[in-house]
Image (tube, helix red, strand yellow):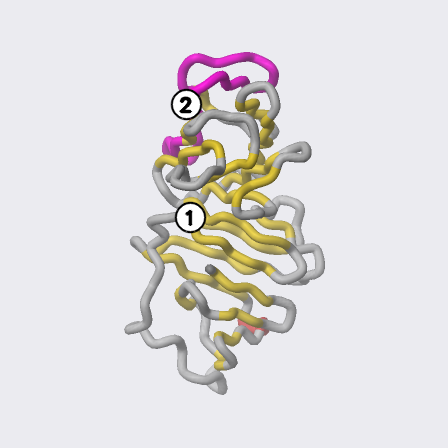
Amino acid sequence: MSHLARPVSPSATLIAMAQPKILWIDGVGSYAMCDHHEISIGQAFPGNSVDLAIRGDLSRKAAIIRRHGEDHLVQPLQNVGIDGVEIDRAVMLHDGNIIALGPRIELRYVRPTQLSGTARLELLGHTRWQPLLSAALLLGESCVLGPESNSHVVCPDWTSKLVLFRNGNQWMCRASEDANISIDGKLVRAPFPLIQGQRIRGDEISMTLE
């Protein structure tokens, strides 16, 4: 790819996501990028400083999801059930588990592959995230966006994948060499840093981290 323009300058501001940012993928959806060791979930109302807020009937802080190696534990702070069984202590989550927060809020925990510690948290029913999201990503060391069913974010119209991965406190992107990735109109070499506010485009890819 020697014909490509110079890569993104290393002096650019890189994002260590101390608060969940939102990844907008055109034609696919919007995803909270959660890379905390602990993620708090609670009711959406002004001044409530939870990581993931839900518009619905639940406590100010209903639960915490904690990363434990490559796995996740859910710690109840109100009435919480896993697959219909109420829990009173931290419980390890498994792919497909339904997490009930109180009587009306349900979340599905999806871990597409055991080869990665990243999982997807989907809100079920008619309740909504605040802000509106397609899902929340509980990030491990890497996150795959692509057309395969075992991708963390399934992008059905893509023919190749894009991988997000940690580099210390920074997040980087890696794509195939023929993806023709550009940022704000300038072609870049992979891997390249994931930078808040910049538009990432390719032959099939169009997304922004906000």
What residue is pinned by disc 1? 20
Q: Residue at x 55, y 64 (%)?
A: 207
Tell whether position 72 is magenta.
yes
Q: Considering depth in this image, is 62 or 9 the residue closer to the camera?
A: 62
First in sequence, mark 2 or 1: give its number.
1
Q: Amino acid at mark 2?
A: Gln
**Residue 133 horizontal/vertical position (percent):** 57, 47
- Asked which secondary structure carries label 1, the reply is loop
Q: Is residue 67 visible?
A: yes
**Residue 20 horizontal/vertical position (percent):** 42, 48
Q: Which residue is the extreme one toward the bottom?
A: 3
**Residue 59 horizontal/vertical position (percent):** 46, 25
Q: Considering depth in this image, is 143 or 123 the residue closer to the camera?
A: 123
Q: Which residues are magenta?
A: 66-90
What residue is pinned by disc 2? 75
Q: Amino acid at mark 1?
A: Pro
Q: Residue at x 48, y 83 (%)?
A: 4
**Residue 117 horizontal/vertical position (percent):** 46, 39
Q: Residue at x 48, y 81 (%)?
A: 186
